[in-house]
Image (tube, rainbow, N blue to C red):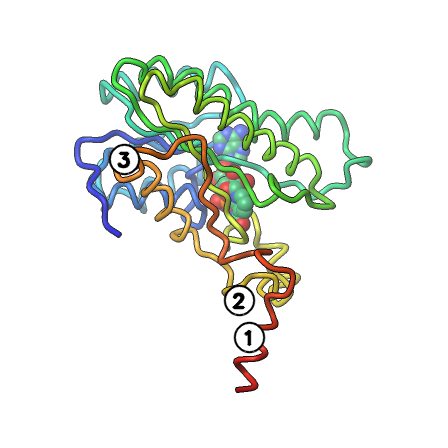
Amino acid sequence: MSFNYSGRVVGVTGAGGTAGIGFAIAKKFLESGAKVFICDLNEEALNLAAEALKPFGDVRTFKTDVSKERDVKTMFEAAYKAYGKIDVFVSNAGIYPQKLVCEMTEQQWDTVMNVNLKSVFLCAREVFHYMKDKGGVLINAASYASLMASAGSGAYAASKAAVYSLTKTLAAELAPYNIRVNGFIPGVIETGMTKGVIDEKRGELEGAIALHRLGAPEDVANAVAFLASDEASYMTGTFMEVSGGKLCVQNPHMPWKIKEEQ
Ligand code: NAD
């Protein structure tokens, strides 16, 4: 599906590097004609992304820690100064530390909550100032872990469950301002975040997915481009699951086995 975002301004957090979901989202919007600003905590990754995105259109970068109020304010002030408006904002940045809950320090717990959850609050609150007169679209990254918790990443799952809930509340609170708020739920997408776990058990992960394959960042970017579009103008407070049918049934192997035997 192709989209026309000419004249629109789109921001994406956590879009550093060239292998992540944020980068793919930024690229999709640029290819669709939008002006895009991206941010990341990692400056080297941000520069890498900027170089790779330049051929596709007008892109600006902001080194930003999305868990810090001052950084978030500065990013939006600078973006608004540069473009005069912000139409779409995607809160994509996130971290996924593997740690048993009872082995976590208070600081480790707080870091997960601050980066994955507080950032969504800070970005929504700040971008609201710039969207409230003209309307806009916010899109937040949840996770499969917001629907089904996961041993070894309890803080991550809790933070994403809270993002799921916060997205719905924001959808209701911002509806009078013509601001739609939705989210996406990736299944297992091949990025830097999931490399370790995929290297360890690719077959097992693929086996739990109806389509029997892992996802690419572009699969998520396509869904985000749709959610932000006018074609989705009656969608708010909802999530698009981009998972190839992960865990949609308890026995995804069965139909594949039957087909093999035919
Ligand atoms: P990734 O690790 O490839 O990219 C995340 C980016 O966020 C990195 O560039 C990182 O530097 C940046 N970041 C981290 N902390 C930051 C901070 N404080 N401020 C600014 N930037 C910061 O991850 P990804 O796989 O592309 O995931 C993108 C989003 O999708 C995340 O929210 C993640 O939780 C969610 N998600 C991913 C998957 C998956 O399978 N990859 C599954 C479910 C949910």
Q: CA distance from mark 2 to mark 3?
A: 35 Å
Disc 2 marks a residue whose amino acid type is His
Disc 3 marks a residue whose amino acid type is Val
Q: How many marks?
A: 3
Q: Which quadrant of the structure image shows residue 34? A: top left
Instruction: Check whether the beta carbons of the residues at disc 2 and disc 1 lie within 8 A of each other.
Output: yes
Q: CA distance from mark 3 to mark 1?
A: 44 Å
The secondary structure type at the circle numbered 3 is: strand
Up-down relation of residue 50 to residue 213 (above or below): above
* Extreme residue toward the left, this view: 6
Task: Please report the residue visible at 31 percent of the width from the left and 45 percent of the height from the top.
Answer: 27
Side of 178 where 196 appears, left or right: right
**Which is nearer the N-term, disc 3 or disc 1?**
3
Side of 160 where 92 appears, left or right: left
* Extreme residue toward the right, this view: 102
Mark 3, other Cα within 10 Å: few <14 / some 14–19 / many ≥20: many
In the depicted view, which residue is nearer to us: 139 or 108? 139
Can you identify the residue that label 2 sits on? 212
Task: Please report the residue visible at 23 percent of the width from the left and 49 percent of the height from the top.
Answer: 2
Can you identify the residue that label 1 sits on? 256
The secondary structure type at the circle numbered 1 is: helix
Can you identify the residue that label 3 sits on? 59
Task: Please report the residue visible at 52 percent of the width from the left and 19 percent of the height from the top.
Answer: 68
